[in-house]
Amino acid sequence: MSTSSPLDYKNIMLAEETTISPHNHFPSFLEMKVIQETTHAGQNAITTTLQAIQDHLYKNLTHGNTFKQKIMKKIHDIIQTYKLEVEALVHYIILRKSLLHSQATLSESMYGMKRSRVTSSHKLQELDSQDGIRNALLLSLSTYSFKRMETFFQKIRDASVINGKWKSFKRVFRQVYPYLHMSQHGIQLLYEFRYLIGSSRYFDPSQHILGQIVRRVTQADLDAKKKKSIGRDEIAWKENKSVVSQISSSHMEVIKKSITIAIGSALMIGYIGKLRQLMQRIRMQQSTSDHSTEERDGIGYHNQVQTGNEESAQNHPESEKAKLEGFTVPPPMKPIPPESFEGVEPNKNSQACPICLSDRVNPAASSSGYVFCFKCLVMYIRDKGPHCPVVGIHCDESQVVRLFEPSNGS
């Protein structure tokens, strides 16, 4: 690993923050604040992207019950249940990829920065792969833990009565978390103040725990990276050259023959496929012509029979009348009693959904005319079967009609 000169930041003054000097290896306080805000914006972008994916999956869940729809519903449920865990996983993957590639987070590399490890003798060393993995784990897990505690606190803060398991723990957490949250922000503020006055080069506690600092990418770093990439290219070219030189002329002939046979086989398969399509097209034309001939013959026979019956009725009206008088008309069939169906009771409130008993959201009507929440009706049909939840007549998803009710202000 390459080493650089010892750290020298004891004489840094606040006046240096009025200008950003490219000759200083360490970024200014303003640059670090910009990097911090960029990191927060990136985390918010991940959250917004996952929410957009979740909304898109929810919109496509009500258009069928195929295997694809089941997979989409499973993904939607996973994102909805483990949203913070999915965000932490995506955050870790991005951090790990960026740290292993450029030894910096994505926001730090955007501003020409990188991370270096501080040794016991106050010298800088390049990060290895283990340092990058530890860094990505700490940053992603710390962000996830604070978000998880904040979500849990918001859930139990407004609850007048705490029910369920761990009642005592929830009460203690509701009392302790505000102080924990204040301590976390206070420690971060202390680190930033020490960085501002030049008494420390650690901008946040995570850098102090890992023993890493953020510094500018210098020309020496660019030259070393370029030399390393050139060395890898030369090694790869030499290895490829040695492999090619080891292949004998007989092997090359075998490869040429194999390529020729493969090309010929592909052409033959394509010709056979076209011939098969041509034969199928001819058979379809023949079957279509035979079917139309049979239809014409059937129509002619029907017309002949109808014409003969009309002529017979005109020539022998008395015999036709006698036939009608001797024919007894059967009584009509009794109405079929409705099947017994135990469905949901319709709500007296006309604005409420009979299933969830709440005000309708995205109203939709079944084939019987009853109006439900669109999501409630579709989920009921998928779980209970294609029938109306109230009266039980047949109603599948294709018969569901979405309604657009006027707003109260209109």
Image (cartoon, grey):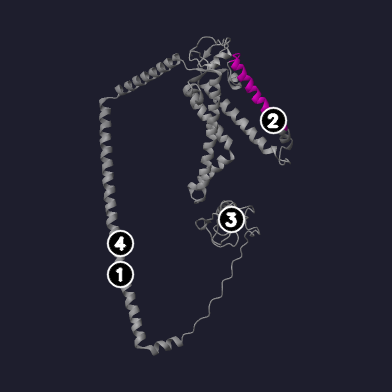
- The residue at which mark 4 appears reads as 288
Q: Nearer the viewer, mark 2 or mark 1?
A: 2
Q: CA distance from mark 4 to mark 3?
A: 48 Å
Q: Earlier in the sequence, mark 3 or mark 2?
A: 2
Residue type beneath disc 1: Arg
Q: CA distance from mark 3 to mark 2?
A: 43 Å
Q: CA distance from mark 4 to mark 1?
A: 13 Å
| Residue 9 image position (x, y, % from top left) | 56, 11
Residue at position x 25%, y 36% in the image: 260
Q: Nearer the viewer, residue 39 or 327?
A: 39
- The residue at which mark 3 appears reads as 372
Is disc 3 placed on a helix, strand or loop?
Answer: strand
Is disc 4 placed on a helix, strand or loop?
Answer: helix
Q: Are marks 4 and 2 in contact (CB under 8 Å)?
A: no
The answer to whether residue 153 is left or right of residue 99 is right
- The residue at which mark 2 appears reads as 178
Numbered badge on residue 296: 1
Residue 118 seen in this snapshot: no
Label 2 Cα crowd, 10 Å radius (few <14 / some 14-19 / many 20+): few
Q: CA distance from mark 4 to mark 2?
A: 80 Å
Magenta region: 175-200
